Image (spheres, grey):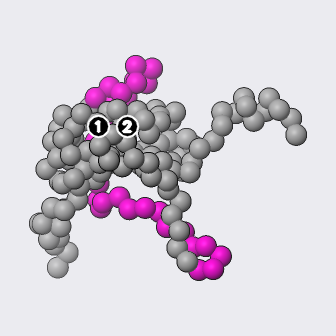
């Protein structure tokens, strides 16, 4: 009892990335992983702790994900931020966020765009203008 199936993580092909600057863009995550074999897509998520952001990168298989982790873990991502990336296998594969519409049907809050050679990139709806734009034009 309490034992986990040793093969339970065998199918996880998503990496969890922390240590990112709070102004990171999905394009930067794409550029970080695009040279890695089997890279498919990424998502940025806000943790709820200020503006702290984490990312999830999805690969075609777990072997590709682990190779990317080994190649990029502890990489210094931003010269203005003193931390390095911490990359580990995610607990589960990333899925689209689904929300209920007023009629009870499910819809996705994420937008997907196609990159070169059909590579899918996920863009979340967490886009906010910089504060100076919000205060520059009084209502």
Q: Give the residue pinned by disc 1.
A: 33
Quadrant where the C terminus sits is top right
Element under label 1?
helix
Whether residue 23 is in magenta: the answer is: no
Given contact means CB atoms under 8 Å apart, are the residues at marks 2 and 1 in contact? yes
Residue 29's tag is 2
Which segment is the magenta one? 75-104
26 and 90: which one is in front?
26
- CA separation in Å, label 2 and label 1: 6 Å
107 and 118: which one is in front?
118
Residue lying at 59% horizontally and 44% vertically, measured from the top left = 127
Judge whether residue 45 can be spotted in this image.
no
Residue lying at 39% horizontally and 47% vertically, measured from the top left = 114
- Identify whether 5 is placed above or below 66: below
Q: Position of residue 19 (x, y in %)?
A: 38, 36
The reply, left or right, for residue 3 in relation to residue 19 is left
Please tell me whether the stretch drawn in magenta is mainly helix, strand or loop. loop
The reply, left or right, for residue 26 in relation to residue 138 is left
22 and 67: which one is in front?
67
Q: Where is residue 55 in the image (x, y as percent from the top left)?
A: 39, 45
Q: Position of residue 110 (x, y in %)?
A: 50, 56
> Which residue is the extreme one toward the front?
117
């Amino acid at each position: 009892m309490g034992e986990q199936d040793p093969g339970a993580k065998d199918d996880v092909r998503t990496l969890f990335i922390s240590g990112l600057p709070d102004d990171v863009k999905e394009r930067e995550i794409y550029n970080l992983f695009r040279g890695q074999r089997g890279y498919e897509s990424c998502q940025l998520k806000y943790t709820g702790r200020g503006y702290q952001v984490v990312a999830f990168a999805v690969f075609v298989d777990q072997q590709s994900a682990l190779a990317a982790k080994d190649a990029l873990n502890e990489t210094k991502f931003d010269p203005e931020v003193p931390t390095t990336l911490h990359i580990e296998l995610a607990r589960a594969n990333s899925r689209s966020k689904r929300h209920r519409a007023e009629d009870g049907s499910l819809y996705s809050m994420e937008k997907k765009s196609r990159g070169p050679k059909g590579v899918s990139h996920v863009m979340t709806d967490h886009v906010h203008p910089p504060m100076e734009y919000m205060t520059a034009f009084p209502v």
